[in-house]
Image (cartoon, rainbow, N blue to C red):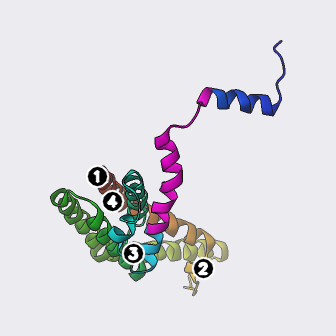
Amino acid sequence: MGEIKTAAEIAREKLEKIGEPTEEERLKWKYGPEGEKLAALYLRENINLENEIGKFDAKARQIIVDGINDILLRNITLPRNETAQKINAKSIDGLKALKKDKAALENIFTKMQQILNHYVQEGAKQKKEAYAALKAEYEDKIQEAIRKQTGVNARMNIDVEKQPQFQEDWQQLQAQMEAQYTRALDEYKKELAAIK
């Protein structure tokens, strides 16, 4: 049987295996959060990202830009409401200001905009139709269950939208419908992340 070690001994051994952090890792730890803070500030207020980045030395700039890019990309989501649409537009403008390969950027943004526009126009219509179909299906099921139980074939007014099972099924259906848009959007976001 082996020797029993304390948690401190195990942690020390793991630290020895990891070794000392490189200068690049230290810079990421120091300036990565700065980039994230600048991105959050940019999204809340109207700051000039290029001017803010220019306040840092050359070693820190790329790390800060990477942190900003990460946050801006994460904030591009399906435009479920007007606020999300505004955040998307602002995130895209911020990425346009930071990335150098403008042609590749515009190409991806054009494709991304098609997905977002389709979501707003066709996706909303599809959701409305799916909701109505699910509601009708639930109403029919409940009326059938009542008819079987009571033997009476009378239509009763039942608010199926308040039924927990209806809500759960609607959430699942909605997630399935949005998954195709999310996958496409995530692919474009990966392409954007690769552009310098």
Q: Distance between the residues labelled 3 and 2?
A: 32 Å
Examine the image and state in which quarter residue 126 appears: bottom left
Q: Of the residues shown, which amino acid type is indicated by label 2?
A: Lys
Q: Nearer the viewer, residue 195 or 87?
A: 195
Q: Distance between the residues labelled 2 and 1?
A: 42 Å
The disc, 2 or 4, on the residue closer to the chain's N-terminal end is 2
Q: Name the residue under label 4.
A: 185
Residue 147 x/y as whole percent: 59, 76
Q: Is 27 within the magenta? A: yes
Q: Is 16 within the magenta? A: no
SS type, badge 3: helix
Residue drawn at 39 percent across, 50 percent down:
59
Crowding at dot 1, Cα within 10 Å, few <14 / some 14-19 / many 20+, comes out as: few
Q: What stretch is highlighted in magenta?
A: 17-38
Answer whether residue 181 is visible to the viewer in this image. Answer: yes
Q: In this view, does 15 lie to the left or right of 74?
A: right
SS type, badge 4: helix
The disc, 3 or 4, on the residue closer to the chain's N-terminal end is 3
